[in-house]
Image (cartoon, coloured by chain):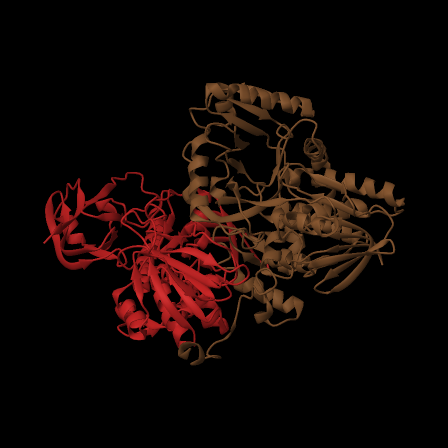
Chain colours: A red, B brown
């Protein structure tokens, strides 16, 4: 099999990339999806709040996904469900498998990586205690409750205040469970402010910042959880333990981009984002291989995933028509003032086709800041930010006009300063 | 009336059952858990020790060496993962060199072949990630690594294929000796047998002390472990032991047969025979110690941590044979490390003991081999394609991280002594054993188990007993729980 563009993953990023690539003129597109339907994790996100930026209205996850699925179907974009990609070679040969066709070998001219992310597990957190039933990642519990109608537990402690954890605190409550507490290791929440208000405060669920789980009790099923306050070194402070009788521990302690396939094919991975290092075209270290969405870096809103993936779709089509650019003059995007990373990590101004969105996150909560985008020292963009938090993604739009005004650009720099 | 009842379906009990199944007779294995391999056998270093460590002249030393020699052929016969990767005991200071030398000499006396003391240069050639401060090492090329789950499961399945019965969820509560046979009292009624073999792991002293005049004492010695992501698989290629020295008894860093890296164990004596909980102190201690012999241990790549209990007998020796004052009651007690390595030798040794005691006759049609769960990853592309055409379930990946197909899970459920729980499937197929730790696949495996075992999904457990994964359906108790 041969396709111009193969998209790995049919979630929001993959769908948006496919639609944008189609609209940019490509007619040989294949989406490979491992689940039973298109739409990815959105299908289990039955709460609303999706699509405000994209559609100007509040949709549920499945509704948001359906809009993109409809667009993909209208364009008759090909896709395979229940199909797992086993490996991808550096020269873009894909081996996948499903029931009907068995092993499938596909050669792609361009690949867009949109595999999404997974949740950090209990093991990766090294939480001590027993290993009974009743410990779930928030997303697994979300699938059980929202898609299968099963209650994973009755009395719940949640570790981590990531958005899925907050959403699940509310969901479990609405379905008849008692959520006793949400404990967060950090002194601030990793989730969106609106989720703290709507999912915890509105239901009188306490959020304990600077707390972590120090023991899991129960040999067969969880019977109790002990949390404790942590000091500035994030180590538990003896004597601060609080015990909860409960049958369930949900974990919402961060998302990890799923880049096993990317690593397998030799794509360079950023140790900060755990996603591929990409340039202005969202192209990875392998020419013709692009990445977008949560596989690239974990997003806070799906609207931005769609926007980013559409850019990757268009870039893939440009790559198909122009081929590999021999002469590249990548300028690394540098930063200071608490920024952890930027996507893209580098920009070749000559290759910027549209206005370019620079996305980044900061490492801690900061108040009254000014973000500046500097091209060769000129502040081309200045934005006041009353509050910046690690849970919310920041973005700056670098326009073609700004770049055109700096024809001999050598430095792209972002600063976060006190106002 | 059984001829022989074996108590405990860990690696020792299953090995004894397997070697005994070469003989005629009615035999039964009683196990308190819901599956084989649920105690110490599932939570250990998964090492096939070369045999230089156990004191020369001990039964432990003899069984270790014999077990080590038997393992390669057994792995072929019973189709479980085994690799002779070699082990290195790393010596960190000049002053400890005499201890390394003594270990070498003990090994030679025990009959371990190819032992060699290597200098720092050779050591770092063999293992580049060993600490730069290491001065020498004992190299044992005959050391190996094994899948402890499939070793145990393979022994059990093969015993079953040869007619040994298994009864799970059955806990022994006492014994009565009368008219030349034992009545074994359990939570599921009484069982009668001419002979009893006690392979009850950390409970083997409890059972022994119910019948014997000479008391045994076993201390559950907890070992905490961290298992690292497969992307660390090439971090070390040998099993790296620390020479017991100034830092006390060390911990090992080893590849596993599946390509992970394992780090452990601690050694913490506890009271609770069910105390398989890790502790923060244990894990911190482990991480600190492991870092002493290797450079830049990628401990942040930990995908799970766990603890197992060694059945440490006070004299640190295997207790194998008829219990004093309790005829026809045979102990296999105090089987701690190197118990996994020794298990085939113990099985063979005990089966020969029983043949002599009981005059057992060899079976005419003993089935000496067993095939494991077919892993399509081991097939050529052509053969895999053919398999999917015949059995499409092999084209459906259920566990993404370990790329386990529905076909393998169905095999694990429907084979003899098949999986009944999530952990049962995991130990047989590795579904859920990868980096996401069953986050994605557990709902799907639960669904398959419920469908295949014809039970409600709410009945499916993690590991039997009260370990239910689901407690009800949405809104079924709305109001009740919150008002409490």
Q: Is residue A275 left or right of residue B268?
A: left
Give residue A352's position: percent from left, percent from top: 24, 50
Looking at the image, which is closer to me, B17 or A262? B17
State the image coordinates of residue B11 (x, y, percent, origin top left). Answer: 68, 46
Q: Residue furthest bottom?
A: B479
Q: In this orientation, does residue A362 appear? A: yes
Is residue A26 at all visible to an observer of this figure? Answer: no
Tell me which corner region of the image, top left, top right, bottom left or bottom right, holds residue A201: bottom left
Say which of B17 and B368 sits in front. Answer: B17
Q: Is residue B110 above or below residue B262?
A: above
Image height of A143 relative to B25, above or below: below
Residue B189 x %, y %: 75, 65
Residue B356 placement, left or right of A407: right
Total numbered circles: 0
Residue situated in front as seen by the camera: B383 or A229: A229
Q: Indicate whether A235 appears above or below B101.
A: below
Q: Quadrant location of the C terminus of chain B?
A: bottom left
Quadrant of the image for the N terminus of chain B? Answer: bottom right
Residue at screen point 71% across, 52% down:
B210
Furthest toward the front, the residue is B213
Position in image of residue B381 (x %, y %): 62, 47
Specify the quadrant of the image occupied by residue B165. bottom right
Hey, which quadrant is residue A5 in on the image?
Answer: bottom left
């Amino acid at each position: 099999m041969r396709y111009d563009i193969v998209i790995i993953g049919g979630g929001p990023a993959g769908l948006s990339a496919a639609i944008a690539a189609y609209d940019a003129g490509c007619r040989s597109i294949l989406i490979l999806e491992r689940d039973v339907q298109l739409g990815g994790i959105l299908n289990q996100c039955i709460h609303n709040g999706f699509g405000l930026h994209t559609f100007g209205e509040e949709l549920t996850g499945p509704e948001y996904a359906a809009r993109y699925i409809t667009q993909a179907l209208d364009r008759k974009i090909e896709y395979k469900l229940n199909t797992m990609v086993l490996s991808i070679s550096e020269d873009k040969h894909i081996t996948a498998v499903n029931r009907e066709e068995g092993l499938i070998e596909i050669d792609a001219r361009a690949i867009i990586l949109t595999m999404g992310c997974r949740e950090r597990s209990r093991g990766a957190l090294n939480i001590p205690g027993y290993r009974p039933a009743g410990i779930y990642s928030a997303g697994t519990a979300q699938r059980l409750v929202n898609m299968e109608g099963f209650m994973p537990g009755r009395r719940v402690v949640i570790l981590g205040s990531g958005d899925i954890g907050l959403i699940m605190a509310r969901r479990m409550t609405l379905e008849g469970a008692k959520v006793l507490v949400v404990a967060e290791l950090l002194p601030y929440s990793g989730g969106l402010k609106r989720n703290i208000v709507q999912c915890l405060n509105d239901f009188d669920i306490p959020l304990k910042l600077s707390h972590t789980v120090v023991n899991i009790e129960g040999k067969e099923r969880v019977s109790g959880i002990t949390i404790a306050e942590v000091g500035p070194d994030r180590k538990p402070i003896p004597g601060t333990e609080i015990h909860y009788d409960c049958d369930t521990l949900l974990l919402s302690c961060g998302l990890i981009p799923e880049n096993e396939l990317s690593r397998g094919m030799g794509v360079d991975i950023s140790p900060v984002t755990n996603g591929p290092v990409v340039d202005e075209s969202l192209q990875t270290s392998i020419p013709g291989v692009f990445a977008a969405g949560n596989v690239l870096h974990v997003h806070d809103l799906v609207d931005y995933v769609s926007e980013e993936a559409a850019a990757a779709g268009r870039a893939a089509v440009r790559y198909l028509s122009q081929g590999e650019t021999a002469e590249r003059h990548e300028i690394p995007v540098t930063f200071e003032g608490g920024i952890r990373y930027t996507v893209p990590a580098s920009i070749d101004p000559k290759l910027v086709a549209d206005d370019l969105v620079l996305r980044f996150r900061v490492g801690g909560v900061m108040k009254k800041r000014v973000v500046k985008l500097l091209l060769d020292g000129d502040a081309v963009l200045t934005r006041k930010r009353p509050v910046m938090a690690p849970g919310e993604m920041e973005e700056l739009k670098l326009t073609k006009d700004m770049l055109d005004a700096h024809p001999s650009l050598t430095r792209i720099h972002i600063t976060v300063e006190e106002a | 009336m059984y001829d022989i009842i074996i108590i405990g379906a860990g690696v020792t009990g299953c090995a004894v059952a397997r070697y005994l199944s070469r003989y005629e007779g009615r035999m039964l294995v009683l196990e308190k858990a819901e599956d084989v391999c649920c105690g110490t056998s599932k939570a250990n270093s998964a090492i096939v020790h070369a045999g230089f460590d156990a004191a020369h002249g001990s039964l432990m030393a003899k069984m270790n060496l014999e077990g080590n020699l038997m393992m390669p052929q057994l792995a072929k016969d019973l189709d479980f993962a085994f690799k002779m990767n070699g082990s290195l005991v790393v010596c960190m200071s000049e002053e400890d060199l005499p201890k390394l030398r003594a270990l070498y000499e003990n090994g030679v006396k025990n009959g371990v072949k190819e032992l060699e003391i290597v200098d720092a240069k050779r050591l770092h050639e063999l293992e580049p990630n060993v600490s730069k401060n290491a001065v020498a090492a004992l190299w044992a090329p005959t050391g190996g690594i094994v899948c402890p789950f499939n070793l145990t499961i393979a022994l059990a399945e093969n015993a079953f294929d040869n007619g040994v019965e298994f009864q799970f969820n059955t806990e022994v509560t006492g014994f009565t000796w009368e008219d030349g046979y034992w009545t074994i009292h359990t939570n599921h009624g009484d069982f009668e047998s001419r002979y009893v073999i006690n392979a009850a792991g950390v409970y083997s002293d409890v059972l022994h002390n119910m019948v014997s005049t000479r008391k045994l004492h076993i201390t559950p010695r907890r070992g905490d472990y961290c298992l690292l992501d497969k992307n660390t698989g090439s971090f070390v290629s040998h099993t790296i032991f620390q020479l017991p020295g100034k830092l006390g008894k060390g911990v090992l860093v080893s590849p596993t047969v599946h390509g992970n890296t394992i780090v452990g164990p601690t050694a913490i004596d506890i009271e609770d025979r069910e105390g398989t909980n890790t502790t923060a102190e244990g894990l911190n201690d482990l991480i600190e110690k492991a870092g002493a012999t290797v450079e830049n241990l990628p401990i942040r790549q930990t995908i799970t941590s766990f603890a197992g209990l060694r059945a440490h007998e006070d004299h640190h020796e295997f207790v194998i044979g008829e219990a004093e004052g309790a005829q026809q009651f045979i102990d296999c007690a105090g089987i701690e490390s190197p118990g996994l390595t020794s298990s085939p030798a113990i099985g063979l040794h005990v089966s020969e003991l029983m043949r002599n005691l009981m005059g057992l006759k060899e079976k005419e049609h003993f089935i000496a081999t067993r095939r494991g769960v077919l892993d399509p990853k081991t097939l050529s592309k052509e053969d895999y394609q053919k398999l999917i055409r015949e059995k499409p379930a092999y084209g459906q990946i259920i566990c993404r991280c370990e790329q386990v197909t529905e076909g393998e899970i169905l095999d694990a459920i429907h084979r003899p002594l098949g999986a009944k729980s999530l952990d049962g499937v995991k130990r047989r197929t590795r579904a859920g054993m990868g980096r996401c730790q069953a986050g994605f696949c557990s709902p799907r495996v639960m669904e398959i188990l419920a469908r295949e075992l014809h039970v409600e999904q709410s009945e499916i457990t993690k590991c039997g007993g009260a370990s239910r994964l689901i407690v009800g359906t949405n809104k079924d108790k709305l109001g009740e729980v919150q008002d409490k």
